[in-house]
Image (cartoon, grey):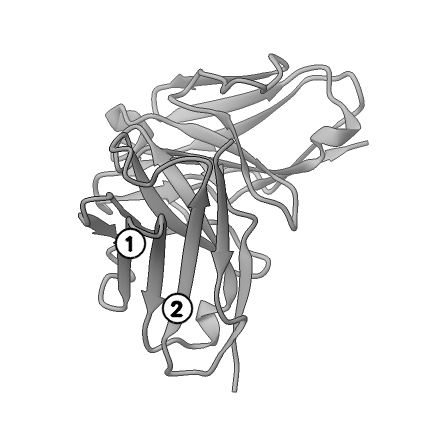
Amino acid sequence: QSVLTQPPSVSGAPGQRVTISCTGSSSNIGAGYDVHWYQHLPGTAPKLLIYDNINRPSGVPDRFSGSKSGTSASLAITGLQAEDEADYYCQSYDNSLSWGVFGGGTKLTVL
Amino acid sequence: QLQLQESGPGLVKPSETLSLTCTVSGGSISSGNYYWGWIRQPPGKGLEWIGSIYYSGSTYYNPSLKSRVTISVDTSKNQFSLKLTSVTAADTAVFYCARVSGIWTGFFDYWGQGTLVTVSS
């Protein structure tokens, strides 16, 4: 059970917009620690999508965006494509655990 | 383009020590701007950060695994390694090595493909 809570699954049709939430607490996201997001297709290396809450690495389409407010963060994907079907993980730091943590992951299904 | 590649036995017996090496190519592990880390993913479960190391040898370990984990670096070979002692079936996982950007608690911007390690007799 991670201290960062993500919905187990989300889905959307091609072209739609979906959001994936990452809910934490005052010891992690709420304490001001940055949130990062990864896309993971089984059998491949996870890919960094968003770092430091809102920044996209070079090469990541602007269809992916991140936001953070209070004790939560969100990843939004617009113009959903079949290739976006993957697992998505948030990551932050928790000062009560004194360690970096990942969310439990969210499986995105493109209908 | 930076590349990381994990290597090591795919099968380890219970109570023994799991040993993996990550070879970095396309960049120097001694660049000084990054840390290097190990992450694992048990089958059907999420990601768990095991620990990180700086090229100087400074290490940071997950408190839940600290008593069993050792991460070391060999700058001459551009490699860093993981040792996990007294393994059980619960340690069966895909192990990834990755570069940590920012601070030691930063984000992982380059990852290896991962290697499955099964703990079984």
- Horizontal side of residue B108 vs A32, given as left or right: right
Chain where mark 1 sits: B
Q: Residue at x 33, y 66 (%)?
A: B83
Q: Is residue A31 above or below residue B13?
A: above
Q: Is residue A65 above or below residue B117?
A: above
Residue A40 horizontal/vertical position (percent): 60, 40
Chain where mark 2 sits: B
Residue identified by numbered label 2? B19
| Residue furthest front in the image | B76
Camera-side residue: A21 or B22?
Answer: B22
The crowd level at tag 1 (other Cα within 10 Å; few <14, some 14-19, many 20+) is some
User: What is the quadrant of residue B118 in the picture?
Assistant: bottom right
Asked if residue B28 can be seen in this view, the reply is: yes
- Horizontal side of residue B79 vs A89, given as left or right: left
Q: CA distance from mark 1 to mark 2?
A: 14 Å
The crowd level at tag 2 (other Cα within 10 Å; few <14, some 14-19, many 20+) is some
Q: Earlier in the sequence, mark 1 or mark 2?
A: 2
Q: Residue at x 41, y 59 (%)?
A: B21
User: What is the quadrant of residue B105 in the picture?
Assistant: top left
Residue identified by numbered label 1? B74
- Mark 1 vs mark 2: tell me if same chain: yes
> Of the residues shown, which amino acid type is indicated by label 2?
Ser
Q: In the rendered structure, are the residues bearing label 1 and label 2 in contact, judged by CB atoms less than 8 Å apart?
A: no
